[in-house]
Amino acid sequence: MKIIVLKFGGTSVGTLDRIVKISKIIISYIKKKYKVIVVTSAMSGVTNELIKKAGKISKNFPNSERDVLLSTGEQMASALIAGKLCDLGFNSRSWMSWQIPIITKGNYSSARIIKIGTDQLKRYLKKGGTPIITGFQGLNKESRLTTLERGGSDASAIMLAKFFKAKRCIIYTDVDGVYTTDPNLTKKAKKIKALSYEEMLEMSSLGAKVMQPASIQDAKLNKVKIDVKSSFTNKAGTQIIGRKKIKDTNIIRGVSFTKNDAKISLLGVKDKPGVAAAIFEPLYKNSINVDMVVQNISSDGKETDLTFTIKSDDLLKTKKLISRNKKIKFKKLIVDKNVSKVSIVGVGMITTPGVTYRMFQALANKKINILVISTSEIKISVLIKSKNLKKSVELLHKEFNLNK
Ligand code: ASP
Ligand code: MG
């Protein structure tokens, strides 16, 4: 069987007109003799509305019931799509996760798919049916409904592609692919033809919101080939594939950035074992995500300065936790709310020396000061003043030949 998985995001099924439109996309694949597995998100806005309702009726709405409530969004969309396909003369029906079943493990609201039954669906596909599967939801050991993290329909699609050995998985969304940087920031942004899982993972964790990061991890582990395309236009999209299959030899694939960062510096912290752990423990316990961290080498061996970044939304809470923390002593706390992180991403930097230097020199040439630096195998991030954000992104985009 030539199986293909098509996933439609919230805006792609956002109105009844859109559902008619994507039904035609589905039919175009059926006509090309594909056995089509469709995965749908909830109509845009629906999941957020449901979350609000839960919050209004109870401050302690149980997580298990939250998942039952939220999964209704996808149920509604799947029935509407299946209904339209039947109306157009095709054999189609909705499948809830528990009917397949899609088995998950882990906590409510952040479950992960571990297994998908294939027998029933295979029989259905063989008979010429087109299943419309609810994304984002699964079933746990206790036979209760679960949901994946927000944006989790992507993960549903990827895992279905894995268990059904699909030729590929097409993620239909409202942008026509992954760009070298945010097209809203600069007109120089170009659509990327193909990038590796690792690059996509870094870029989506660093601010590019095209796909759910956890789903890309699933795709990488299971070698699922992905196409990201727009359901609004008929343009070629972006492929996400293994790095060996990529022909483009550019060292850097894209420039990502985040906007709402805040920097905290603790000056005059006692330099002894356990201090950093004592600072970060309460933050971790309160689910505050610490991103970049630098600790200066102390000149006298007694005191040091420690700087780290968090999301601006967490700033007040973080300041409170630090001032209440009896385990740490420091002389001064300095906060900077107007900082942004700019990153260059590309597997090419593993084998190319001098990328770090080029990045820093390009920023220095324009007198842009670097506040904090962090690196991984395939990315280099710098923290800068937010007022320099656009300029920095544009100059790095040019420096690494992404403007062409
Ligand atoms: N409807 C869910 C959400 O809004 C899942 C998804 O869209 O992928 O997070
Ligand atoms: Mg979505």
Image: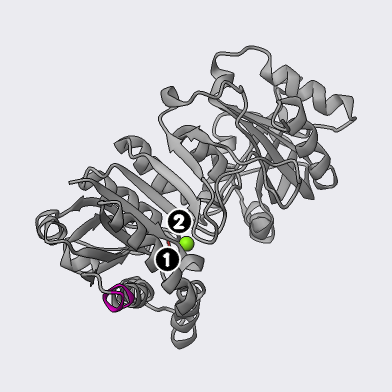
Crowding near the residue tagged with mark 2, few <14, some 14–19, many ≥20 C-alpha atoms within 10 Å: many
Give residue 172's mark: 2
Tell me the amino acid under the disc marked 1: Ile
Residue 152 appears in which quarter of the rendering?
bottom left
Q: Is residue 324 magenta?
A: no
Identify the residue shown where x is 33% and y is 40%: 224
Q: Give SS at disc 2.
A: strand
Task: Please name the predominant secondary structure of the magenta segment in the image.
Answer: helix
Mark 2 to mark 1 CA distance (whole Å): 9 Å
The answer to whether residue 234 is visible is yes
Q: Which stretch appears magenta?
A: 84-88
Percent of width and height locating residue 77:
37, 74
Compared across the picture, whether 235 is left or right of 330 comes to: left
Q: Which residue is mark 1?
A: 22
Name the residue nearer the viewer: 103 or 2.
2
Name the residue nearer the viewer: 343 or 34.
34
Percent of width and height locating residue 254:
63, 35
Name the residue nearer the viewer: 316 or 220.
220
Can you say whether 169 is above or below 370 in the image? below
Crowding near the residue tagged with mark 1, few <14, some 14–19, many ≥20 C-alpha atoms within 10 Å: many
Compared across the picture, whether 35 is left or right of 244 comes to: left
Residue at the bottom extreme of this rendering: 57
Tell me the amino acid under the disc marked 2: Tyr
Percent of width and height locating residue 321:
62, 56
Name the residue nearer the viewer: 298 or 126.
126
Can you say whether 52 is above or below 282 in the image? below
Compared across the picture, whether 209 is left or right of 310 comes to: left
- Location of the C terminus (image quadrant): top right
Q: Give SS at disc 1.
A: helix
Identify the residue shown where x is 72% and y is 52%: 184
CB-based contact (under 8 Å), mark 2 and mark 1: yes
Of callouts 2 and 1, which one flags the residue occurring earlier in the amino acid sequence? 1
